[in-house]
Amino acid sequence: MTEIARSASGSNGAADGAAAPAAPAADERSYSPGLEGVIAGETALSQVDGARGRLLYRGYRIGDLVERGTYASVANLLWTGDWEPGHRLPTAEVPPAVLDILRALPRDAKPMDALRTAVSAWGATQPLPWPPTVEHARALTAFSPSALAAFARLRSGQEPIDPDPSLDLVEGFLFQLNGQRPDPGTTRALDAYFVVGAEHGFNASTFTARVITSTRSDIASAVAGAIGTMKGPLHGGAPSEVVDQLAKVGSVDRAEAWIRAALDRGERLMGFGHRVYRAYDPRAAALRTVAESMERKPDWLELAIQVEDVALRLLAERHPERALKTNVEYYAAPVLQGVGLTPDLFPATFSLARHAGWTAHALEQAGANRLIRPDVRYIGPSERDLPG
Ligand code: COA
């Protein structure tokens, strides 16, 4: 029993003759740290089936969406529920006021900080009345790739490039980043990464976006908050750490000894294990296929494939009680590096992809809104007098 529950009869500081405040009853309601296992909402957007390793967007299998869709069509599916494979979403201009702010940022600012700042500033330039609309979602999702590309160029002393309305979102992003149109294979690979990153249930950043929306705040505030949440290393993930890990392994004949030693030191293998998936992450499976078919795949992809087998075998040996399988980060790394992104852009690129999910959740939350305001269990001191 907590201290607060025991404190029925102590000094209470009440004026003479006033009734002593009743001690609050012990709070016996259940509490799950991290809200693990707690159902905190309802969604029709995606279904994450961790036991069977399945991910569905509005009922459609992620593998089929990667194969037959594009990011623009998947974003539209999430926003509207309609499957229109030919749907397009070119990138949008960065308003001059936002560009001024990006120019003013230190060149060594983290891309996630720059993106969060840009989204916040964009919100200040737009009328975004309640409730959020599909048009708000489209406009913000189309703006952010231009903003990230602009910052990436400004920090290396280059001028931003205007959007080309003839290009779809992912191709437009690469064009504005590099100043030249990517080849179709490169576009296809990054588009696949955007599709698998678009949406994933009630993860921390999506929950943040829903909490912010539930106060009837606007979609830019919801997404700025979500980016701040995704910035944390426990969420944003680090495909770049997969690259570092493979560099340390070096060659397949060293893999077993290196992995055993790492596990003996209590280290975690990057790109393995997941809070929800107990089977092979379906996003990793889709990205592995994409990575293998890339023209300009990194040299170490073959090594990654061989090391994966060794890692899975040793993880199963070490943790027979817990299925530790490959997660999305493992094969995101070769795709992101293969399309020419520098590792420090990986987390912000993940955020660009997740815009579709965040904004779709903002729409869904607004459509049946109830302020999200849970309770907390008080574990501090009982009521007492100030000293002196
Ligand atoms: N390598 C080695 N051991 C791992 C592991 C990994 N990648 N992931 C989990 N484990 C082990 C833990 O050490 C723990 O062992 P213990 O009980 O002996 O201490 C056990 O498996 C359970 O771990 P737990 O922290 O409960 O798992 P989780 O489901 O909360 O963690 C992750 C999920 C993703 C945080 C975790 O798997 C991890 O850190 N993976 C590596 C980082 C990564 O790839 N992140 C990207 C995720 S998309």
Image (cartoon, helix red, strand yellow):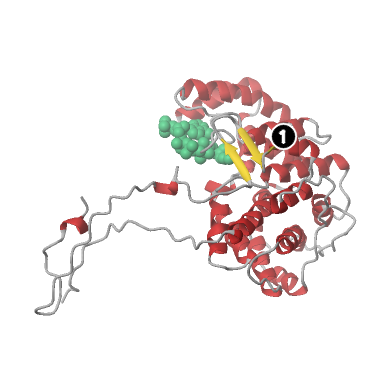
User: Can you tell which quarter of the image residue 331 is in?
Assistant: top right
Q: Amino acid type of disc 1? A: Gly
Q: Position of residue 87 (x, y in %)?
A: 82, 50
Residue depicted at x 75% and y 57%: 145
Q: Position of residue 361 (x, y in %)?
A: 62, 54
Quarter of the image containing the C terminus?
A: bottom left
Q: Looking at the image, is 263 positioned above or below residue 381?
A: above
| Residue labelled with disc 1 | 63
Residue 381 falls left or right of residue 121:
left
Count of numbered badges drawn on the protein: 1
Around disc 1, counting alpha carbons within 10 Å, would you say few (fewer than 14), some (14 to 19), or many (20 or more)? many
User: Can you tell which quarter of the image residue 159 is in?
Assistant: bottom right
Residue depicted at x 36% and y 48%: 31
Residue at the far right in the pictured view: 166
Residue 326 falls left or right of residue 263:
right
Q: Looking at the image, is 207 positioned above or below residue 313?
A: below
Badge 1 element: helix
Residue 228 in view = no
Residue at the far left in the pictured view: 17
